[in-house]
Each structure stands twice: as structure tokens, then as C-alpha cells.
Amino acid sequence: MTERVGVAVIGLNGAVATTAAAGVAMIRAGSNDLSGLPLARRSIEGMAAYRDLYFGGWDLSHDDLATAALRHGVIGDKELSNGASSLSGMKPWPAVGSTDFCANIDGANKIAAPGHRAAVERIQADLAGFKQDQGLDRVVMVSLASTERKADLEADALSSLDGFERGLDADDAAISPAMLYAYAAIDAGVPYANFTPSVAADVAPLAELARTRNVAVAGKDGKTGQTLLKTVIAPALRDRALHVDGWFSTNILGNSDGLALDDPKSLASKVGTKKSVLDQMLGYPVEDDIIMIHYYKPRGDDKEAWDNIDITGFLGQKMQLKLNFLCKDSVLAAPLAIEIARCLDLAQQRGQCGVQEQLGVLLKMPQTAGNYDPIHAFNEQQLILDRWLEDGE
Amino acid sequence: MTERVGVAVIGLNGAVATTAAAGVAMIRAGSNDLSGLPLARRSIEGMAAYRDLYFGGWDLSHDDLATAALRHGVIGDKELSNGASSLSGMKPWPAVGSTDFCANIDGANKIAAPGHRAAVERIQADLAGFKQDQGLDRVVMVSLASTERKADLEADALSSLDGFERGLDADDAAISPAMLYAYAAIDAGVPYANFTPSVAADVAPLAELARTRNVAVAGKDGKTGQTLLKTVIAPALRDRALHVDGWFSTNILGNSDGLALDDPKSLASKVGTKKSVLDQMLGYPVEDDIIMIHYYKPRGDDKEAWDNIDITGFLGQKMQLKLNFLCKDSVLAAPLAIEIARCLDLAQQRGQCGVQEQLGVLLKMPQTAGNYDPIHAFNEQQLILDRWLEDGE
Amino acid sequence: MTERVGVAVIGLNGAVATTAAAGVAMIRAGSNDLSGLPLARRSIEGMAAYRDLYFGGWDLSHDDLATAALRHGVIGDKELSNGASSLSGMKPWPAVGSTDFCANIDGANKIAAPGHRAAVERIQADLAGFKQDQGLDRVVMVSLASTERKADLEADALSSLDGFERGLDADDAAISPAMLYAYAAIDAGVPYANFTPSVAADVAPLAELARTRNVAVAGKDGKTGQTLLKTVIAPALRDRALHVDGWFSTNILGNSDGLALDDPKSLASKVGTKKSVLDQMLGYPVEDDIIMIHYYKPRGDDKEAWDNIDITGFLGQKMQLKLNFLCKDSVLAAPLAIEIARCLDLAQQRGQCGVQEQLGVLLKMPQTAGNYDPIHAFNEQQLILDRWLEDGE
Amino acid sequence: MTERVGVAVIGLNGAVATTAAAGVAMIRAGSNDLSGLPLARRSIEGMAAYRDLYFGGWDLSHDDLATAALRHGVIGDKELSNGASSLSGMKPWPAVGSTDFCANIDGANKIAAPGHRAAVERIQADLAGFKQDQGLDRVVMVSLASTERKADLEADALSSLDGFERGLDADDAAISPAMLYAYAAIDAGVPYANFTPSVAADVAPLAELARTRNVAVAGKDGKTGQTLLKTVIAPALRDRALHVDGWFSTNILGNSDGLALDDPKSLASKVGTKKSVLDQMLGYPVEDDIIMIHYYKPRGDDKEAWDNIDITGFLGQKMQLKLNFLCKDSVLAAPLAIEIARCLDLAQQRGQCGVQEQLGVLLKMPQTAGNYDPIHAFNEQQLILDRWLEDGE
């Protein structure tokens, strides 16, 4: 007997979430051939089938998912009529928003909750209602919301679980919407994945809570385009002893993620996310490691990355490698979000709680269970995930 | 006590060989910091130090190595006066040449040998003289010659060791200069590496000879620029389930390698070398896998590769990845040739004879010990080499 | 009162022709905003309006234009239902074909004509019927057929008008289908434009015929993507005294034009067309001027050009400029074909006969009225066209 | 009899100035073949020969020009020993500097002048001494200094000539070092060219002064790499009716110009310089016209530009053009600065005073003589310069 798994998404009307929801609906309808889903060719005991995933979630917009999807332009009328028609009947639940944490993104579909505790209760009620209404066996929460500004990690509320609890009571401004969702999930025993660069379950109090409550968590920031290539190529340059003198990366994209990153505070959070990746893979500091992200409307969701890499080889000779990736942000991200949800659900069933490091290959800044740096090299990460999938460890 | 290892190079005046010889001379002089040498950071018991390598070899040109190096333009007066001055005293031995096998490359410094057997004897005498004159403990032969045209693998002489021996007696036209060198080395117990795309020790008779004589061999075609990137990136696309619809590769280069490849027959041999790599890594046939190489004089040894990769992801959406590698052919190739020489010498000492598959990461079309396909994925190859270096197996 | 102008196209089912016909139908329907039509913003006395153009023509395929257009994939159901529905009622007339002249392209919809004279009569009958059936005031013929192989310009039949007439009588193999169409048009007083690289009205006999019959002709080969950029950029490099050391151009495309060019003989004709352009603009020979065209299926009609330009500046310093044009072959070509038809019709009305050199800006290898080289620099060509449009000379 | 023309440079130790000075010295020595000098092939009556130009000027650094040139890395020992040895004997005069106007650039070689009037007097004394010491017939001043921050154009001192004079008396902070130099030149009857993006002779008071004193001036900002290409390509896109939806430009460079632009205020001035160029050439506003400049050390003076241009053609179809220019900033700029100096000197001799608009082809943001926009299209600008050179008007 198949078991139904709910995926409760923060940012349900976004391009990634609508693409994921449409893709799964089309799989159920038999009109999507599983291309782009990294784990589609594998048969893993206990892992939910794509067709058994059911989407729900929160958004600051009132629109139904079909309307939202057409606005993003990733999928069109063809897809909606070809298996994804159910999206027009799906509407997001009111969301917790904060223009303080995410300046360029706001909307009318807000939780009317008088404070942090009330918001958490509302989120947990939404989760319970979702499970019941859809007849779900299990639920996973995935954050696909817009990037928030950097958190103040020195704040009392973010330094200990006790502090966090007091912060909830006091509606402490250091606690962001993303953290409220993460707290609500973990507290309710629901696995939580952070697919955004925002600070969420990786603050000390929530990491602790996940351990004590035996809840699987993973994060953060889906590894889609430019960082994917960086973590594929840099280890090979290291293996060939080709010294990286500089790596200049620029991105242009025109979706709401791009708009959110145009807020300098959010960008800082995003770039902070990517920065040290290179040094850790190479084993030496790269002085000129520059990453730029620009909102550029003509492209919509079609993201483009241009990288220039300066390298030095034998006899000190200089060479250059340039990459130009014309990708589709949500098309790359949606299947990763789906796989993270499936893996977290599997980990929870296997009783593997706390931070799930083996999911690092899917993430730009993998959260670690302890106070150490994550592995970033793609090939090493993939080996770790493969082993976990096959051997359970 | 250090042991001196000779590297007998076919094509000693070429850009790769002069770059390698200069680089090692500069290492001895303390003016080369080992950048670009893949195994420089490792300490492997029994492996010859870079400073203990001594170069000699054959070439169709009479020029001393300094003159040849300046003509290639990879290194200049600065390097020659800065540790590589010994090159001006080095002259290649007369070589076996054949305009039938390599139409665009010829020269006056030819072995005056009346036939195949005489040529083999002369090569073996050169090896013996090299060892004695330089006080070498061991010698390795490395082919860095220009690419020959495709061999006729159906010929009797290339079908069995007996046939080959008969072909030597009869000066059979199916036996190329490259095969004469390979035979001479293996017959003399000297490890042999084929760094070119030409057919040499990979014909059945010579593979058999290497096994029966307990000689380590490896080949073929150094994995430098475009193929290196292909074998780094394709496995990651496979892991992400991003389907490769087409991969168009074009190269421009202006060194003598480029000139040799302008002969359509040599190009066929080269492109044949690269072709099936992609299909084997991805697990499905890529219909549009096109590789072009063009002689383009303005660049000299500065090779440039441009790749366009068409991929399909989630929901059948199309994306493109483009690579532009402004590399230096010989600067990438020379350190690989040096490492192959060191590894072959180590394998021979370890008593590991026949085809050394663990060197596949350094080669475009790794020769295998049996009738099966090689591994091409860079990360898998690197793991195999790492294990062999550390564990000896 | 508006006058109706027929455009009789050779290759009516091709991607360029169907795009042009659909675009004009959509203009009539009010659903095409004239973007991409170079002369749309101008008001030229006597020039036919876009909406007054009517398409007909020949093709080796039987398919109606809607079917053909959908196969090319340039326009889709949206365009067909949005103004271009009339294409489904349009069928090409049987065409003159020759697998000798165009090896990769053939079809069943062939003129059953026993020889050259009969073919010419049939073409002229088609023109007359077109005019009558559609109530046209004037007709222009435009060749959009696939590229033929190089003609034998030394043949008797191509050396004088008398020889050509004798060749028609004798069904001389030197006379290609393209020349039969051109002869038929000029002989019938119908202006003729050659938008392909094939040899047609530019052979001496037909150029003479155009003069003596007072018919306007123009050719050849529409200047769309890569050559357009070359003739835009090279003059500026010359004005800045930046010396071009080499210009490497490669193209990938997957439409039937690409397939035709995969026949080496047709490619020779095409590349011959482009070759000397650079030298003429710069005023000195560029030794390394390489142009490659590759059939690459994943792209369909989406052509991609990659250019690398090596330049030398002040103090002999080397620089590089690279261009990557992701264009759509037919989307660039169709409006040029439309403008050539309008301009030829205008020239004929103005009584300007023979070769119309002022249309050179629209063509890769502009035919000249005499034995001299054409101007290639885009800015100079544009000034000439502008003057002709405004002042009539 | 030849006449000697002095070029008094602000920023004499910079990469552009040392490249220009070395290049002219090498021309005198016969070791520079005039490549990269736009007007080298022309013979213009009255224009100073390259060999008759003599460089002097101001800099905040004490270093001699040979030392400075080696630091920039544009020219090396080879050039210095090959005709440019005189640079080691050339030292800059103390300069006027202001860390308020140019935050990242400072130095010890400063004019010890108690205020604006004293600075002007010192500059004029330097000019007079230069002329006398070098036996010059005429002098031209060229600003090659680092970019200053935006000026406050609303300030009293910058609104009228009277206000400016009062500002000089009062050491008004609105008057920048660049303006002091421009004032000193014009007041002394010395033609003045502004090759930087800084505000200088283009403020109203100085433009007026140039007219009343009959002094030729030109500016501003040399049109070298990315903007050069933009003004070459955009007019052709307009002529082809290809609509520009967006133009994203990014630059990486590692010389001191890059460092100066890393100060956000200077960047604003630079980007402001480039911004509206596109709209003016195309005739419609381009919403997404983004220009980024990044300091990226590995490249030194080797600037790299990457442009992505989104265009819409026939039937609303989208295409993309990408440019990648690997150029050398000073190698492109130095010859333009030399030509501007020669042209200004010629204009002054011809009695053509005030703003010399015909030099617009050499400049990114051409200063106009009146309150109207400049022409930006390269081809139109070149025609204007050609006419002026040949016909004197």
C-alpha cells in the first residue's frame, strides 16, 4: 500500500514551488518523463514515489498556483492542460511575512497573528489541517521563500534554545519568519529543509531542538547552476595542480528571486553563503573570488551565469577558463527540492535525526551537524549520498 | 641514494617535450615551483623525484632543444637563462619517420636504417647508449610524436605477435614508426607510454608482448584541455539527470600538432580517439557529439577550445552550457607526460606489468588490459589513481 | 488604390519562406508589430506595403505551408491561429530539382518537364497563373531554395547569352535549376532576387539578359547573422587601426539549410561566398580567415555562431574579441527577403534595371553591375541604401 | 622645419600615459610600427607628426616613468631597452591631489600650494617651464588622471564663470583638482583634453572660458573597449530593426583605474558617463541597461568585458548576442590620447576654438558645444572626423 507524503512549502506561489507542484502533478498524469530528477533512476527501499507527493503551503500572495505559475513563465498553458490542471484549484495558506527581513517582497495574504507564539500555532495548525484534509501519512516542510536579510546571530534569542523560547514570548525582532516556520515544523516533529540562503534551522537553538526532538533537518540553499559548476570544476583543477588565481562569477536573472537579491541586505546573505566554498575545495585562499547577482528583467526565470577563472599551470603559465550557463533557475531547483523532501522523509523513517549531512550534494552551503566545515566538492558529496541511499549510512 | 631515471622521448624537439625538459631542468635549478604537476604534493614511496629525471630522445629535426623551444614559443629566453640553459647542449638522436603515416611532418634528422629490424636495433642501441652516457639507473620511453594516420588494424602484421614479427622481417607497410619504437622499448624491457593518439602499443601484438616480457605500458593521448573538461562535467550532468542532447566542441591551435591534425587522415585518428567518451560516461548515446580541430596560426601553442552543450532538464526544458578554455597545449601536456613517466617507472619497480589502467585519469583514451571499455569519468579515474598511489593496487 | 504585389518564391516550403509568408499574413491580420523589418519605420513613395504582398511559389515538397512551417518549428500553433491560418490553404507548385546540384535535398513535388526549355515554360506559366489567380498588379521572384553546388563557370553555356540559349536547347548539365528559374523570371520581365549562395542571375549570360530586358535583379545570399556582425565590426577595427591577425568563425545549425551545407560541395559554394569579405573591408589579407558550418540537430532553426578574432594594437600588443550569437536563422532572414522583394519591385517601377547594387546591405556577397568588387562594410552599404530610398539614386 | 609639440599630462605615471610616452619614444627610435594609431595612415596638412610629440606632466607619485611603466606591466624591459630608455630619465612634476575627490588614489608627490589660486599658478608655471626646457613650439594638456567622484554641479562655483572665479579665491570645495588643471590650461591658452570620466572643462564656467579665450577643448572619457563595441553594434541593430530588450555589461580589470572605480562614488561618475548612450543611439529607452565594473587583480591592465544583449526580431522572436573582449586597457587608450592631442593642436592652429565636437569618435561621452546631446553611433562619428580631417570642417 502506498503512503501519501505531504510537502508543505513556504513560498508556495514562487517559481520553484509551482514548477515542482506542476511537475509532480504531471508525473501522476503520466505526462512528465522524470528527466532532471537526480534520483529517478534509482530504486530505494522506503523512499516515497514522486507520484505520492502532495503539495500545500504558505504564500503572501492570494493567487491560485496556476495563476502564479503562468506569471513566472516557467511552465505555460501547455503544461497546465497537460496534467497540471489541478494547480488552478490550489491556493496557498496565509503566510508570515516581514518587510524588515525581506524588503522587496510583500503581499496581502498574511497571517493575522498577534505575535511569534500565535504565528507558530497557526503554522502548526496549518500542518495538521493539511495532513488531515489530504489524508497524508507524513509531512515534510520545505522552505522555498525569498531570501531574508542576514540574521543577527549574536542576539540572545539566537544563542540558545532557552533564549529562543524567551524570544518567542517577547516577539523578539531577531527571530525571522523563516525561523518561526522552522521552529513550528521541528516542534511538531515534521522534517524541515531550508532550500533558501536565509538563516533558519541552522541557528544554534533550532539545531539543538532538531536533535532533542529527533527530527531530520537539512539546509541550506539549493545547489543549482553556477555553484554546481564551481563545485564540479574546482576539484578537478586541484587534482591537476592548476592554481586558481581568481574566479569571477556574475549572474543575471529576472525572477522574484533576483528582485529579492537586489536588496543589498539579502544579497549579502546570499553571497556570504557562497563565498568560502572555493577556498575549502582548493585548500588555499583565492584572493579574487567575486560573485555578483543582478536583477535583469528580460530573462524572467531564465538565469544566466558567466564565470571567468584565471589559472596558473606548469612554469607559471597563465590560462583562462570561461563558463556561460544559460539555465532555468526553477527548472534546476524544483527537482532538487523534490529530492530533498523525499530524502528527509526517508531519513525520518530510518530514525536518522538532526542535520542530514549526506544531502550536501543538493545544497550550496551544507549545514553540518557539528562545528566543522562542510564538504563542497561535488564528486565527494555524490559518493556520500550514493552510499547513504544504498547502505543507509 | 637517489636513482637517476631517463626519459627517452619520441619527438624530443616538440613543444611538449621541450617544455617538459625545460621544466625539469628548472626544478633542478630551483626556479620552478612545481605548479601544474598533479602529483607534486604527494610523497610516494619509490617514485622518482622530478629532479632525478633526465631527458633524451629522437626527433626528425637536428635542432638543439633550446632552439626548438624558442621556435615553439612556450618558454622564452627568460626560462632558458633561468635554469634551462642546459637545453642548448641537448640534441635529438636521428628518428624513424614516415610521411606515409604523418603527412605534414618531416625532417632531415632521419635514421639511415635499411628496414624495420634495423630501425628497431638502432632504437635499442640509442636506449642503451642513453643509459650508459647519462649514468641512468632506469629508462622509460614516452611517445610525444605527431599524430600518425589511422592504422590498418585488420592487417596480418597487426593481428598477432607472430604476424608482427613476420611483418618486421618483411618491412610490412602496416607497421608504423610508432609501433617500431613501442616494440623496441618493450623488447628491451623499457616501460613505454603513448602520449599521442597514434596506434602503438595498443595493437594486439604489442599488448601481448608487454605482458609476456613483463613490461609496464600505458596509453593513449594525454588528457589535457577539452576532453579533461568533458570528463569532469559530463558525470555531474549525469548525476543531476540533465540529459545531454548535443555536445559541439571546436578547437583552434597553431602549433605543429595542429598542423599534423590538418591532414584529414591524422584528424580521423584523433577524433576517433575522442568520440565515444561521452556516450560511455552518460550511459546513453549522444547523437550530436561533434569534435572539430582547426589549425589557426595566430595562436601558436595557445590552444583554445569552445564547447556548446545542449541539455534537457525537468519538464523537458532546454538549457545550454558553453565552455571557453584559453589554454596552453604544452603547458598542460608536459606535466602529464612527466607524471606518466614517473608512474610507469614506479609500476615497473613494483612489478606491475602490462597495461597500467590506473593511469587512465591522465589519458584521453585509456588503454585497457582486456577487451572492455575504459572508465572515462574524471572523478572515478582520480579515485583509482589515488588508491594505486597510496595502496599500491 | 493599393496595388497587389506577388512574391513568387523558389523554396516556398522552407523555413525562411514560411516565416515570411506567415509574418505578412499576420501583418494583414494586425497581429505582427513589424519588429525586425528594417524598412518598417520609413515611408517610401511607391514602395509596396507589407500588407499588399502575396506569396506563392515552388517547392519539391507537397505539403501545405502550415504543415511545413510547423515542421521547421520557427512559428507554432499560436502564430498559425493568430493571423497565419491562411497558410494551411497554400500549397507550393511543383518545382525543378536536381540532386546533382543539391545532393541532400530532394522531394516528390517535381515538375514533369522533359528538358530545360519545357521547365522554363512551366515556370513562366506558373508566374502568369499566379498573377491572374491572385489578381496581382506585379510579381517579383525570390530564390529561397537550398544551396546548390558550385557551378562550372567556364562552361560554354555560362559564358555568353548565346551559349546559354544553346545550352537550354541542349539540356546542358552546366545549367542549374537556379539558373532556369532566374532565366524564366528575367525573360518574363519579372524582377529576380537570389537570397541563396547558389550561382544564378550572376552568371554572365543572365546578367546580360537582365540589362537587355530592363529587369531589376539582386543577389546574393542574405546577410543575416555572422556575416552581418563581421561587416559591422571589421570596419570599426580598421578605423581604430587594430590589425586583424585571424578571424575564426564557426556555426552550428540544425535546419534543412544546415543539412544542405553538410554536402561538402554546397559548403564550398557557401564558404566561397563569404571568404574574401574580410580582406576587402580591411584593406589587407587576413591569412587566417576560417569559416566553418556544422549541421547540429539539437538546435533546429536556432543557429548559433561563435567567432574568435585575434587583433594586434599599439606596441604590437595582442588582444582577442569573441562573439557568440544565438540567433534564429529564418527570423533574421525572412524580413530581409521581404525587403528585397519590396525594393526590387520599387526599382523596377522606377525603371532602374540590371543589378541593384544599393541592396548590398541585405546581402552577403553583393552582385555588382560590372567587373569590380562590392562594398562589404555595413555602414557604407546602409548609407547607400538610405540615399537610394530617399533620393531615388 | 618640424615643430615640437608638448603633451602635458595629468597622471603622467599612469598606465595610459607611460604607454603613450613609451610608444612615441619608440616611434622616434624606429621600433614601433604605428599599429593601433587610428590616424597613422593619413596625411593631414598641419598635424604634428608622432615623432614630434614630447611628453611631460604631473603625478602624485615620485617615480620615474620607466619604474612606473614596469609596475603597470603594459610594457616591459624589452620595450624600455628597445627605444623607450628615455623614460627612466623622466620624472613627473608634483601634482594637485584630493582624496575627497578620488578616495583610493593618493601619493606623496603633491604640490605644496596653499590654495586654489596658488595651485593654478603652479600649474601654469609648470607649463611655461615645460615649453622652455624642451624647446617646444606649442603645448597641449591631456588629463589621464584617475576618475574623481561626481561633482556638485548645482554649486555656485560651477554655475557661472564669475562664480568659479570667486570659488578660486575662496578655495571652494566644489572645485576639483581636475577643474583647476583645466582652468590653468585654458587661462594660459593651452588646448585641454579630458580623457577621463571626471567633470572638468565641461562645467559651464570652463566651457565659457574656452570660448572667450579661443582655446580648443575636448572631452570626455576615451572610448576604448566595451563602449566602443556598443557604439559599433547598436546602430546596426537599429538599422536591422532588431529591438534591444536589455544590454548587460560587466568589466573586470586590475589596474589602478579599476581600483579607483571600486570607490562607489567614482563608479557612479563612470557609469553615469556611459548610461544613456544606448538609448540615444537606438531611439527608444532600453529598460535594462546595466553596466558593472569590478576590480579583479589577476588581470592587471588586461581588461575583460562581457556583454549580453537580448534582442527581439521578426514575429517577436527572442535572440541573444554575447561579446567577450579580452583587451588591454592602456594599449587601446594610449593611441586615442595621442590622437586627441594631435587633433586639438591642429584645431588650435586652425583657429577652431571651444568644444571640438568632431573628436567625439574618440570619446565615450562627447562634450557638445551647446545644450544638446552628442552623437554616439561610431559610424556617424567617424564620418564627422573624416570630414574635418580632410576638409577642415
Image (cartoon, coloured by chain):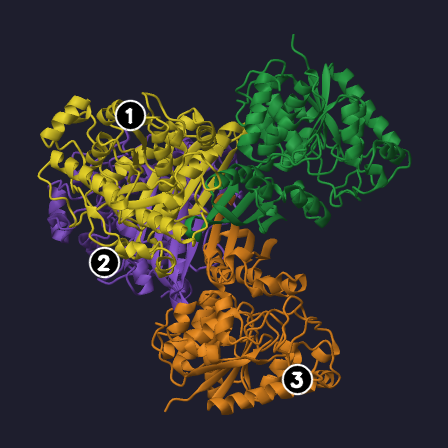
Chain colours: A purple, B orange, C green, D yellow
Q: Which residue is mark 1?
A: D214
Instruction: Indicate the amino acid at tag 2.
Output: Arg
Q: Nearer the viewer, residue D279 or A112?
A: D279
User: Relative to B139, is A149 above or below?
Assistant: above
**Chain at numbered mark 3:** B
- Looking at the image, the residue that sits furthest to the top is C1
Is residue A300 visible to the viewer in this orientation of the structure? no
| In this picture, residue D92 sits left or right of residue A297 | left
| In this picture, residue D372 sits left or right of residue C5 | left
Local SS, label 2: helix
User: Relative to C265, is A282 above or below?
Assistant: below
Local SS, label 3: helix
Callout 3: 10 Å neighbours few (<14), some, many (20+)? many
| In this picture, residue A121 sits left or right of residue C88 | left
Number of numbered discs: 3
Local SS, label 1: loop
Is residue A80 visible to the viewer in this orientation of the structure? yes
**Chain at numbered mark 2:** A
Q: Which residue is mark 2?
A: A211
| x and y percentages locating residue C385 in the rendered image | 58, 25
| x and y percentages locating residue B361 in the rendered image | 48, 70
| In this picture, residue D95 sits left or right of residue A192 | left
User: What distance separates the C-alpha of mark 1 from that of mark 2?
Assistant: 82 Å
State the image quarter where residue D208 is shown.
top left
